[in-house]
Image: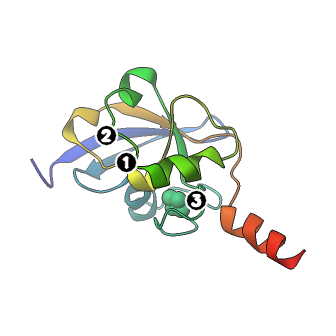
Amino acid sequence: SPGSKVLLHFVYQSGTKTSVMATEGESLLDVVINKNLQIDGFGACEGTLACSTCHLLFDDSVYERLEPMSDEEMDMLDLAYGLTKTSRLGCQVIVASWMNGMTVRVPQGVKDQRVTQEAKNKQ
Ligand code: FES
């Protein structure tokens, strides 16, 4: 039910694991911000599908159950550094009760598309 608590495990780039109680209906970007998880550069565009810094990796069994991707997410995800077949953008994944106990991994690098774009514009 909306507002219920969901236990999530995050694995940082360093391999360190942290567990948080998220709230159903929040995005994973909200969780990172609200729980003050220290992930370098994460969520630079604040969920407006313009940066791909919220790139996260999921277990196969979880990935298969996630809501389908929008075309906009697919396009932005394509540009993410270290893309895998179970990658999603965290700002587009909404916490649901079935996710209780799932593990989310932070990829080994991030690339902020806005910075790439700025660099291109300066050339
Ligand atoms: Fe920028 Fe998700 S926070 S695309």
Instruction: Give x and y (percent) for residue 95.
Output: 29, 47
Pick the residue in front: 57 or 19: 57
The reply to whether dot 2 and dot 3 touch (C-beta < 8 Å) is no
Q: Which mark is residue 118?
A: none
Number of numbered callouts drawn: 3
The reply to whether dot 2 and dot 1 touch (C-beta < 8 Å) is yes
Instruction: Give x and y (percent) for residue 117.
Output: 74, 68
Residue that extends furthest to the bottom in the rendered view of this protein: 122
Residue at 51% in and 30% down? 86
Identify the amino acid type marked 3: Phe
Residue named by callout 3: 42
**Colour setting:** rainbow
Identify the amino acid type marked 2: Glu
Q: Badge 1: how crowded within 10 Å, few (<14), some, or many (20+)?
A: some
Label 1 or label 3, whichever comes before in sequence order: 3
Instruction: Give x and y (percent) for residue 22.
Output: 30, 50
